[in-house]
Image: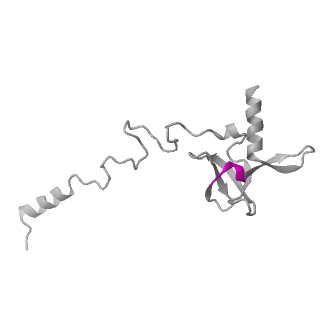
Amino acid sequence: MTAGPDSSSNRNSQSEGTSGRNTSGSNAGGSNADGRNTRGRNADGSLPEPLEHLGLAPGEPVRFRRRPNERWHNGTAVARERDGSLAVRDGKGASRAIPLDLVEVKASGPRGAPKWEPLLDRAARIEQLRLL
């Protein structure tokens, strides 16, 4: 059984134009109509505040709670999320988005002993220092 000239051209015409990519113009790639990258931006197009505005640095040790009555979990600060929460990497390597009022930051006490202070207290102190 031999294939006629139509069968090979029929196969080619079916595969032409289909690259397997979604070209419907949806925003699945994280870009807007202008073609600019919008992934990781707020709803108004601005970037989230950096960790430095909270008095943190990436990789700084923090502890967090998922709910106010849970135990503390250790982690490291990663970045700010679009909704204003803190992106934290926990001890297992999982990423978490934790509200700022449920996070404490490692600090040193008056005699140098390690202690934990609420993140919002540190952020308020850093904000006041920036005003001077």
**Segment colored magenta:** 97-102
Residue 125 location, quadrant? top right
Q: Give 56 or 1, whichever is nearer the viewer.
A: 56
Q: Position of residue 69 (x, y in %)?
A: 74, 62
Colouring = one colour
Residue 122, image x, y percentages: 77, 41
Q: Position of residue 92 (x, y in %)?
A: 66, 62
Residue 19 relative to residue 45: left or right? left
Residue in view at x 18 percent, y 58 percent: 14
* The one of 112 and 44 positioned closer to us in this rendering: 44
Residue drawn at x 65%, y 55% as measured from the top left: 89
Extreme residue in the right direction: 111
- Which quadrant holds the C terminus? top right
Name the residue furthest bottom: 1
Residue 17 spot, x, y in % from top left: 22, 52
Image quadrant holding the N terminus, namely bottom left
Magenta includes 101? yes
Give the residue displayed 57% in from the left and 46% down from the top: 83
- Relative to 130, does residue 55 appear above or below in the rendering? below
